[in-house]
């Protein structure tokens, strides 16, 4: 599995890992935030979740239907994603 990531700032500064929501990409973080953090003494790490952006995609396993996930959870039923 290959997870794409980018960093900003000095690696010797305290590290902040920005974790996107499900299916999120690192491009969702506003540059004013990421550069602001780096310019104020933080080493910023951002990444693309699996199956998004430039990270590894599991196309052969199919896509998760989020409507089915929500419906199952609302009904108290288990949901088994493809991976």
Image: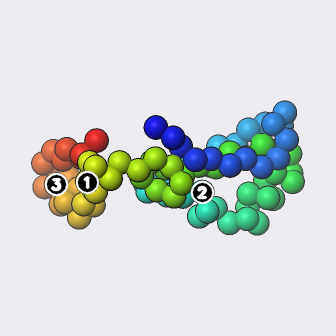
Indicate the position of residue 4 as horizontal and vertical percent values: 58, 47
Indicate the position of residue 35 as horizontal and vertical percent values: 79, 58
- Contact, mark 3 vs mark 1 (Cβ under 8 Å): no
Indicate the position of residue 64 as horizontal and vertical percent values: 27, 56
Q: Is residue 74 visible?
A: no
Q: Residue at x 23, y 64 (%)?
A: 67
For marks 2 and 1, the one nearer the N-term is: 2
Q: Residue at x 53, y 54 (%)?
A: 54
For marks 3 and 1, the one nearer the N-term is: 1
Count of numbered circles in the view: 3
Q: Is residue 61 visible?
A: yes
Indicate the position of residue 51 as horizontal and vertical percent values: 42, 52
Q: Nearer the viewer, mark 2 or mark 1?
A: 1
The residue beneath circle 3 is 72
Crowdedness near tag 3: few (<14), some (14–19) or many (≥20) residues, C-alpha within 10 Å = some
Quarter of the image with the C terminus in it: top left
For marks 2 and 3, the one nearer the N-term is: 2
- Contact, mark 2 vs mark 3 (Cβ under 8 Å): no
Q: CA distance from mark 3 to mark 1?
A: 18 Å
In front of the other: 56 or 13: 56
Crowdedness near tag 1: few (<14), some (14–19) or many (≥20) residues, C-alpha within 10 Å = few
In front of the other: 58 or 17: 58
Q: Is residue 23 left or right of residue 36?
A: left
Callout 1: helix, strand or loop?
loop
Q: Which mark is residue 62?
A: 1
Callout 3: helix, strand or loop?
helix
The residue beneath circle 2 is 26
Q: Is residue 79 above or below residue 14?
A: below
Q: Is residue 22 left or right of residue 59?
A: right
Looking at the image, the residue that sits furthest to the top is 12
Q: Residue at x 16, y 54 (%)?
A: 72
């Amino acid at each position: 599995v290959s997870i794409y990531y980018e960093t900003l700032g000095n690696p010797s500064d305290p590290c902040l890992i920005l974790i996107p929501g499900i299916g999120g990409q690192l491009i969702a973080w506003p540059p004013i935030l990421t550069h602001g953090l780096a310019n104020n003494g933080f080493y910023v790490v951002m990444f693309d979740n699996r199956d998004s952006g430039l990270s590894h995609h599991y196309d052969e396993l199919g896509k998760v239907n989020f409507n089915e996930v929500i419906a199952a959870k609302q009904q108290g039923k288990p949901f088994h994603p493809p991976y």
